[in-house]
Amino acid sequence: MEDFFTYSVILGIFVATFKIATPLLIAATGELVAESSGILNLSLEGTMTLGAFTGFLVANETGNLWLGLVGAAVGGGALGLLMAVMTATVKVNQIVAGLALNILGLGGAFFWYRSVYEEGGAVAFPTVDRFQTATVPLLSDIPAVGEVFFDQHWLTYFGVLMVPATFIFLNRTKYGLELRSIGHNPEACDMRGVGIISRQYTAVIYGGVMAGLGGAYLSLAGGNQFFDDIVAGRGWIALAIVIFGNWRASWILGGSLLFGFLEATQLSLQASGVDLPYQLLLALPFILTIVALVLNRSRSQVPLALTIPYHRGER
Amino acid sequence: MSEQVADAPQDSPRPDDHEAGAGRDPLSMLFQPGAWRLERRLHTRPVYELYATLIALAITAVIIGLLVIIVGVSPLDAFASLYEGAFGNRESALETLVQATPLILTGLCAAIAFRAGVWNIGGQGQFIAGAIGTWWVYDTMPGLPAPVLFVAMFAGAAVFGAVWATVASVLLVRYGTNEILTTVMLNFVIDSGLSWLLSGPWQANDTPYSQTERMVESTFLPRFFDDSRLHLGFALALVMVAVVHFLVRRTTLGFELRAIGVNKQAASYKGVSVGAAIIAVMAISGALAGLAGAGELLGLHHRINFEFGGQAVGFTGIIVALVARLHPAGVIVVAVAFAGLINGATQMQVGTGIPAALVDVIEGVALVLVLLAAVACRYRLRKIAHHHG
């Protein structure tokens, strides 16, 4: 146990915290925008999985990781578009629509992966030359701080930057404020002539794109291949982080980093051979997510019209 | 009603409308503003919902056919081999019923909870809890005589499933914690719990694998035929469909759960104790999934191993329930159809090389289209009076 509290282990935990938080940050800030427009997109797990796959597929076929990110954005965005059609236009129950698209995203990724990479009943498990960390010159030479903050993947910087960007978008721009007012009171917005459906489409597709990019982090930067269970519950945890964060961008950063920190600590405890059943450590993130949801019951910022479809002329 | 009266004169178009429309291209009429109108039906007859579901499934077949063409296989070959593997002969048809057994129960698990507007996504975890409960009874009460042991094992499964669901419902009622997220999280938690049991306290002595001992033969559920694995669990599942149907339609709790499913606030004004109803419906829902776990363990596997939860019957049950539009009897039909797909897909993969994961896509596409169709049948396209010039 003494060798657990060494400089390098603790530094490693902080470095890993940001890596683990990255897909959560990207997906959760996207979901925050979608939910701000009053649409709860429960399909994050499936969307992230599809994005992880389409990103991997494009990167593997073209040999270009950046094109892979485009592929992930398109895959996630397509599922987001379908979600918008089902909820904003057709007004299917949002929970049911989200569950349905979750299944479609997962099934689509599983099937597509096998139809491309399966030969005679066995998958070859191809890999890509994944993203290397983008080292910031000079700043990364600062001891400890440099390694934690300035020697990460591009997608990690992107995920962290999306927090202030999402905050400014939702709170300081006209479009963002209109989006939030749709999420709170669509009738009033409709009377003011603010187009509801087009904004909901934009928000939900954006959420899908971000979930796709979050998934692509797992297959193109954090890891270098695709497999069925690659997302492993992170989509659901991202959804929980939005609720835990009380629909505020800054709290989403806190929630993602807290989660990343606990997960990183767990992983390095596991690696140091501490005498606990590893299954307990595997279950820990999910138990903690439940505890976090129970402890932080503040719902003051919830979009009031979340999950309630808007029908013009009906109450 | 007033809306209907106001619209009534337009229901019979004037003769000149017919003439005006006669020579026109129907498509352009459709897009001409004012010529046709999409409006909400005041009453949707249940049979429309059935038609809409069937149309949605037909469109699903077309989309999947196109997908199969893209993969490079003739859709007729694919569907023929899928059907052959699912219902082609007595053996495969009975095996399809074997696969349908847990799906009927997990389908009921989702259907009854969703009816009440409680989103239990934890059927998978409650299914595993049921298997754990069955094994626990088997392991701790070895001296029981056979009939009592069977009852005790099924009761153990139902109780464990119900308890695992109740964790989420208590958090929901007491703290307002979103039950969708808690039930999903609890699925992951019990996966780890099972893995710990199988590699620790319950691990069989004679193997390095994470699995329990094989159960003694006196605990096997009886089978209907010598040449098939179809076991008593299938009959149990059908009985539970009848029980759930009766419960939902004919009991006070059934009335209450339908009431809170429509409007929690109105139900509470009417004197329904919403919290108690949520706890009750989640416990029943979890118990149904737990019974599925007992049926699979006692009827098929006779030991719990790492692959036990791998069939994901809890998740498939959600799709079964939604495609069945939450009708208990519909759950049987959809569960058998999906079991046929799962069963036939193996043969299809061997015969045509299409990955069996096609089933996942079929399930997803079918669900999306059935949901869209269910909304569509609440509307009608109606021709309304024409304005000339």
Image (tube, grey):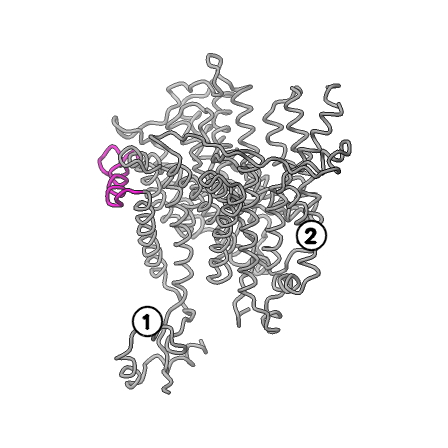
On screen, residue A112 versus residue A192, left or right, reads left
Residue B245 vertical placement versus B138 (above, below): below
Specify whether B188 is left or right of B320. Answer: right
Q: Is residue B115 visible?
A: no
Our reading of the magenta stretch's main secondary structure is helix
What chain does mark 1 sit on? B
Tag shown at residue A267: none
Most extreme residue toward the right is A143
Locate residue A177, reporting x and y percent.
66, 63
**Do the residues indicated by labels 1 and 2 lie within the same chain of the protein?**
no
Residue range highlighted in magenta = B72-97
Q: Name the amino acid, label 1.
A: Leu
Residue shown at 26%/79% (left/top)?
B22
Q: Amino acid at mark 2?
A: Arg
User: Which residue, given by chain and number where applicable, does mark 1 sit on?
Assistant: B27
Residue B290 visible in image = yes
Disc nearest the viewer among 1 and 2: 1
Q: Residues within 10 Å of mark 2 (few under 14, many from 20)?
A: some
**Residue at mark 1 to residue at mark 2: CA–CA distance:** 48 Å
The residue singled out by tag 2 in the image is A248
Using residue B123 as the reference point, say whether residue B334 is left or right of it: left
The answer to whether mark 1 and mark 2 are in CB contact below 8 A is no
